[in-house]
Amino acid sequence: MRFDTSQHMKLGQHMKLAPNMIQSMEILQMSLLELQERIEQELESNVTLELDDPNAEAAAATPEDPGAPAPPAPAEADRPLDMTGASNAEDFERLDSFERANPELGDDEHPDHDRHAPAESEYAPSAARADDESDPKSRAMANAPAHAGSLTEQLRDQWALCEVDPALRDLGAHIISFFDDDGYLRTPIETVLDRFPVADPRPAPEDAARALKAVQLMLEPAGLGARDARECLLLQIDALAEEQPDADYRTIRLLVEEHLDDLVQNRVPRIAARTGLTPEQIKDAMARMRHLSLAPGRRLIEEDTRAVVPDAIVEYDGDADRYIAYLNDARLPNLRVNQEYAKLAKDREAPKETREFIKRNLSGAHWLLDAIAQRKRTILRVIGVVVEAQRDFFDYGPQAIKPLPMTRVADQLGIHVATVSRAVADKWIQTPRGVVPLRKFFTGGTQTESGEDVSWDAIKAALKEITDAEDKKKPLSDDAIADALKAKGLEIARRTVAKYRDQLGIPSARLRKTF
């Protein structure tokens, strides 16, 4: 075998992504809340950036003497930087060219793609400057309640206050550490004993059973420490029966203990035949059981929810008979470049290191302002196309949403599809039909028998409308739903009906049936 070494020269062109261009892409993809946090971070780290508060400046500039002359208007150099200007248009053109050459950088377009389900709550942004005691955001964070501990920590704190046999205290705390987030003990008790930190003497199985029973009876909410759903429900029923001795829980306990599988499958006639209960008695018991929880541990765990603040608002203009869109950026702070630092960067008498440091910060500040302005223009242009293309949605609701590929929007605006994908990522808009994700309007679809385009979301909305209007005593099968959709001009297969029904959380016909 022979090895050779050689040198070769190769001429080629490669485009490298500059850090500032990466920053502009990141800012475009940010939601409104994420951008607000980013601005706060930049204000803390970049000395040349400052808040532009015209009201504060006007108040400071107002003379105390009413008869005193008004101060002169600021010189052009002292005016705040206009964020709507595009001083780096060539750089953004390079960014668009780079995206066209590198389509893999964009998000994959998927018709059924959806983001995390958010919660509609008020948002508390990240901490601003700690030394600014007058900042209302800092005061709000200081007054916010402390974050609750994990489920294990909370249950161990409860257990420490329970009056139990001292011989069982450590074993009970050890058992609690094996609870999952639902509050179940799914680990076999033998494995729990094998992992007990004190190996000599090893706890006996009967001691473990006593400790588990004490944990189940003393910890709240009721149902914790169960090993399956049946035991979880029975623990809650026993706790309710103890709290309400006058109430009769025998029927519910009988159904859970001996007929839980039939209850899950909604086999009311079979239960009635085996127990002698009437369907009305069974339905009444099932209604009372809805107050029980199959995951009691979740009641103690704080859900990690995300706030929803719409990035844009769409309203109807009755005079012009059209929908208009505008950005919901009032909560974003107005930024400008500190002109004193801008002058210092040009001062030859200042130390060279100082001038270079300020110049770097000035460059970052200008890029941030330009990136924010570019983000606003891009999002507003994309939303404008959406409002025009989805007029029927705003007029008639989700059933009228039309297919709208991102490629069509990109071609119409003359930008890359990756730019459209970033512009709609994690963005929400407030419409007359509610607050909806912007990505919802970019879906695939099919054609009706008449040749009209219809989106998959519109088909789902029609499916839900059909099941909501059905006779619950004789619910429609998937084949019957497919036939009902076909009667509306929407022809899809039965398996597609089953898939969409599962996505909408609609149970099968047998489980929807009422007796």
Image: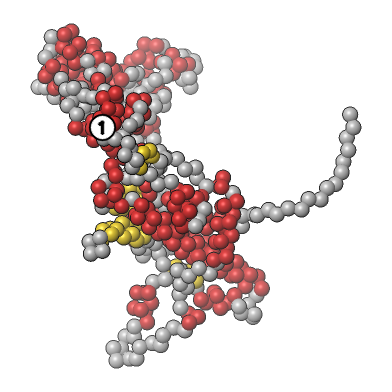
Residue 75 pos. (x, y %): 47, 84
Residue shown at 59% from the left, 60% from the top: 94
**Residue bearing mark 1:** 487
Q: Horizontally, is 411 left or right of 321 in the view?
A: right
SS at circle 1: helix
Residue 347 visible to an observer of this rendering? yes
Along the line of sight, the residue nearer the viewer: 348 or 87: 87
Q: Residue 216 vs residue 471: left or right?
A: right
Residue 165 appearing in the image: no
Where does the N terminus fall, quadrant-wise? Answer: top right
Quarter location, residue 15: bottom right
Query: Does 418 appear above or below 364?
Result: above
Residue farthest to the front?
450
Few, some or many residues within 10 Å of mark 1 (<14, 14–19, 20+): few
Q: Residue visible at 48% across and 22% down?
A: 197
In this rendering, the answer to whether 195 lies above or below 488 is above
Residue 162: x and y in percent read: 30, 27
Front residue of 70/8: it is: 8
Question: Which one is in front, 305 or 199?
Answer: 305
Task: Give the amino acid type for the residue marked by disc 1 in the picture.
Answer: Ala
Judging depth in this view, the residue of 215 and 467 nearest the camera is: 467
